[in-house]
């Protein structure tokens, strides 16, 4: 944790690409980017691979993703001649979850939905981040109230690593402009009103004027988080 002030200062004064390269030089082989394959994540993927920065890129296949999301994984790999590392949930844990709550039990209560996210997302994420010293995310502050107070670089006490949110202060228009300028592949569902895309049963398109994450877990009144970043938000 002794590097936190240094990392924050560097990230504030330098470009995202230079900061990612700096972090990878400080922690060789231990900087990992968790991509949910959203527009923000595709921007960061382009920055990493186009500039040949030593950062591992991985994603979580929950088993309930949209066909368009799987297509994007393949198109992204072809575009950069690289491979996104894919982590899957433990089959036995999924079986137990379905036996206990039903195949779509997440619709019945917030507790059930959180349990589903824990099995399909949190546990694989924990495995993916083993050995990491820096966790890179695609969080933007304007995505939700929960994310509006997050710092650019922080210490994640739960996982004992640094967390870097490079696009934290970017606007949605800046993300779209970058995608257009560099011809970054993106999920075709974005053209149909899907802004924040997760699992297929848990995501819908949003209406004009709605919060960007209104389409996530649209049937419940919650903070619209799956748990990946909740521990950080609470601090």
Image: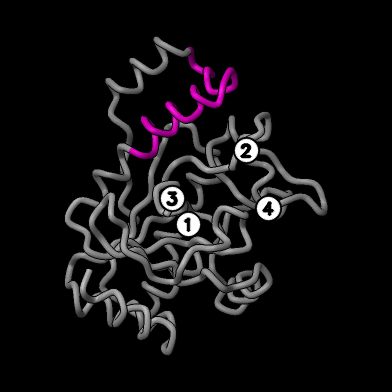
Q: If you read the primary sequence from the N terminus, does the residue marked by circle 2 or circle 1 appear first?
A: 1
Callout 2 environment at 10 Å: few (<14), some (14 to 19), or many (20+)?
many
Residue at 74% in and 46% down: 206
Q: If you read the primary sequence from the N terminus, does the residue marked by circle 3 or circle 1 appear first?
A: 1
Residue at 44% in and 66% down: 79
Residue 47 magenta-highlighted: no
Q: If you read the primary sequence from the N terminus, does the residue marked by circle 4 or circle 1 appear first?
A: 1
Measured in 3D between alpha carbons, the distance from the residue under mark 4 to the one under mark 1, in whole angstroms, is 25 Å
The image's colouring method is one colour
Does 4 sit above or below residue 194? below
Tag nearer the camera, 3 or 4? 3
Residue at 43% in and 89% down: 13
Q: Residue lying farthest top? A: 99
Q: Which residues are magenta?
A: 102-122
Marks 2 and 4 in Cβ contact (< 8 Å): no
Q: Which mark is residue 212?
A: 4
Q: Is residue 85 visible?
A: yes
Instruction: Please name the residue that numbered disc 1 is placed on.
Output: 75
Tag nearer the camera, 3 or 1? 3
Whether residue 171 sits left or right of residue 6 in the image: it is right
């Amino acid at each position: 944790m002794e590097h936190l002030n240094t990392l924050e200062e560097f990230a504030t004064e330098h470009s995202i690409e230079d900061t990612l390269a700096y972090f990878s030089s400080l922690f060789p082989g231990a900087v990992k980017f968790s991509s949910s394959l959203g527009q923000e994540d595709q921007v960061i993927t382009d920055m990493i691979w186009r500039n040949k920065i030593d950062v591992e890129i991985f994603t979580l296949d929950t088993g309930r993703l949209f066909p368009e999301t799987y297509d994007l994984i393949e198109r992204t790999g072809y575009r950069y001649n690289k491979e996104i590392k894919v982590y899957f949930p433990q089959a036995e844990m999924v079986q137990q979850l379905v036996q206990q709550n039903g195949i779509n039990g997440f619709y019945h209560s917030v507790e059930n939905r959180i349990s589903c996210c824990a099995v399909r997302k949190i546990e694989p994420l924990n495995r993916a981040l083993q050995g990491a010293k820096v966790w890179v995310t695609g969080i933007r502050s304007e995505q939700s109230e929960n994310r509006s107070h997050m710092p650019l670089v922080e210490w994640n006490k739960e996982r004992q690593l640094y967390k870097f949110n490079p696009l934290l202060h970017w606007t949605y228009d800046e993300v779209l402009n970058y995608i257009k300028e560099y011809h970054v592949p993106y999920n075709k569902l974005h053209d149909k009103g899907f802004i924040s895309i997760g699992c297929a049963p848990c995501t819908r398109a949003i209406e004009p004027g709605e919060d960007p994450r209104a389409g996530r877990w649209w049937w419940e009144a919650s903070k619209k988080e799956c748990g990946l970043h909740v521990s950080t938000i609470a601090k």
